[in-house]
Amino acid sequence: MNIQSEDEPAQPASPISPSTWLAAPASLSHPGPDEVHIWRIRLEQDETVLQKMHAVLSADERQRALQFKFEKLQKRFVISRGALRDILHRYTGHAAANIVFEYEAHGKPQLAAAFKQNGIQFNLSHAENLALCGVAWRRAIGVDVECIRSLHDAERIAQRFFSARENAMFGALPPAEKTAAFYNCWTRKEAFIKALGEGLTHPLHRFDVAFVEGEPPALLNTRPDPLEAARWTLQALAPGEGYAGAFVVSGKEAHLQCWEWDAPRH
């Protein structure tokens, strides 16, 4: 869910430093049991890539693309879904165009039963010109990326969605630190509910994340089951200048590898 003020256009905030995103290896099977792979996908691509990605989409995905009002949004959808299919092809060996998705009760996509033999789990998030795809092996995963913008009503949004602890921490911050803290908190909370597969049907105030500077990223508390927090690992991501990101994966080990998606040229 992309965050933007309801009352006025959002303005870009100060950028954050990007992480190092490496070229992916030539061949892949699946992440190790303690690994998480995060792929960065740039959604501004040339016409050749756009056509290749459009060609691998299913009929319903092509129809979904046409439902976007603006052409640039249609193109971003085509690239993000086509790139997802290409990434899953690299892990499963199935042709990108042949991959079939199923959807959980709250809309989270997963590989259909015929494609699940190697245990790949994934999650996709996109904002503006960037998408992130998280991949894990036999572990639930959620990923979120947001474009950082100055929000004049961040406090109002926080009061609506953040927990009591998070609001107390957020309210005590100096104004200069609030934009970064807001997006740190939001992406970490969004990644968790996506990992659960519940989306915004899961109340955001029922769990706490660490998000202020100097506090290591973590899922701190979960309610009503306080033991739930210990079943997950949360890590922050730095997708690039002007973006914030995070992922959550089940289990307590998450050795991270960050890769840049390079569109197939053949």
Image: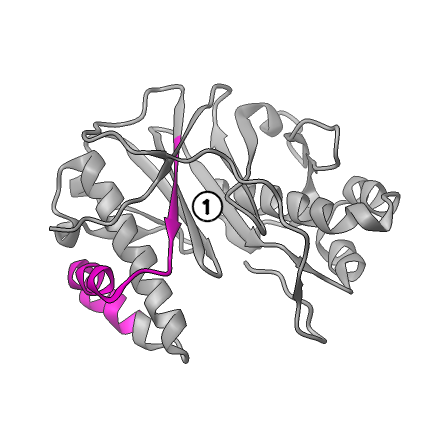
Front-lying residue, 124 or 195 = 124
Residue 116 visible? The answer is no
Whether the magenta-drawn stretch holds residue 179 is answered as: no
Question: In the picture provided, is 215 more to the left or to the right than 133?
Answer: right
Residue 210 in the image: state x and y as whole percent. 70, 34
Label 1 sits on what residue type?
A: Gly
Residue 218 in the image: state x and y as whole percent. 64, 29
Classify residue 151 by image quadrant.
Answer: bottom right
Residue 220 in the image: state x and y as whole percent. 68, 29
Numbered disc 1: secondary structure = loop
Front-lying residue, 82 or 104 = 82
What's the residue at 15%, 63% (across, down)? 55
User: Is 104 situated above or below 37?
Assistant: below
Residue 40 visible? The answer is yes
Q: Looking at this rendering, what residue extends furthest in the bottom direction? A: 69
User: In this figure, which residue is indicated by the disc labeled 1?
Assistant: 197
What's the residue at 38%, 53% (across, down)? 42
Q: How is the image coloured?
A: one colour
What's the residue at 37%, 49% (across, down)? 41
Residue 159 in the image: state x and y as whole percent. 79, 55
Classify residue 60 by image quadrant.
Answer: bottom left
| Within-10-Å neighbours for mark 1: few <14, some 14–19, many 20+ | many
Front-lying residue, 183 or 121 = 183
Front-lying residue, 161 or 20 = 20
Stretch in magenta: 37-64
User: Is 254 situated above or below 249?
Assistant: above
Question: In the picture provided, is 153 more to the left or to the right than 187?
Answer: right
